[in-house]
Amino acid sequence: ASAREWASQGWMIGAWNAFGALDLVVAVGLGLTSAAGSPLQIFDAGAGSLAVASLPWVLIPTVLVPLYLVMHAVVFAQLRRRAAEASAAEAPGPRGRAAGEPA
């Protein structure tokens, strides 16, 4: 894909990635504020939240959520790197030519 195509699609990928990361953060916040016996408990979610305290469900907040947050951070880093590469490719090189343009 050309640098222009990447620039036009990169913001959509970044927005979707930010939405996914925000969803995970909100889920953690809801889990903390609805956990029975938690000092941060704001509302009672009923018996449904007690199931997350036992295996295999406990793996979701302790393993999967942190793993997915790291994966979102990796996507953000890749987007940033590609944006830097795209802007470097469009920057004028020696004698006013764009980088990668034949002499």
Image: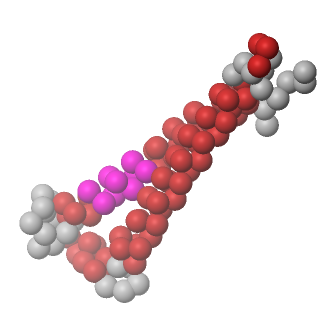
Query: How is this picture coloured?
Result: secondary structure
Q: Is residue 83 left or right of residue 93?
A: left
- The image shows residue 49, relative to residue 69, as above or below, that is below
- Image coordinates of residue 2 in percent, x first then y, are 78, 32
Stretch in magenta: 21-29
Please give the name of the residue rendered at 44% of the width and 58% of the height, measured from the top-left corner. Answer: 69
Please give the name of the residue rendered at 77% of the width and 19% of the height, measured from the top-left corner. Answer: 94
**Which residue in the rendered view is the most extreme toward the top?**
96
The stretch drawn in magenta includes residue 87: no
Quarter of the figure with the N terminus: top right
- Image coordinates of residue 42 in percent, x first then y, are 12, 58
- The image shows residue 45, relative to residue 1, as above or below, that is below
Please give the name of the residue rendered at 65% of the width and 28% of the height, measured from the top-left corner. Answer: 87
For this rendering, which residue is in front, 74 or 19? 74
Count of marks overlaid on the render:
0
- Image coordinates of residue 65 in percent, x first then y, are 41, 65
Q: Is residue 36 left or right of residue 14?
A: left
Please give the name of the residue rendered at 33% of the width and 58% of the height, measured from the top-left corner. Answer: 27
- The image shows residue 102, relative to residue 29, as above or below, that is above
Image quarter of residue 82: top right
- The image shows residue 77, relative to residue 33, as above or below, that is above
- Image coordinates of residue 63 in percent, x first then y, are 41, 74
Quarter of the figure with the C terminus: top right
Query: Which secondary structure type mostly characterizes the magenta part of the structure?
Result: helix
- The answer to whether residue 84 is seen in the rendering is yes
**Which residue in the rendered view is the most extreme toward the bottom?**
55
**Which residue in the rendered view is the most extreme toward the front?**
94
- The answer to whether residue 5 is seen in the rendering is no
The stretch drawn in magenta includes residue 24: yes
Q: Is residue 103 left or right of residue 26?
A: right
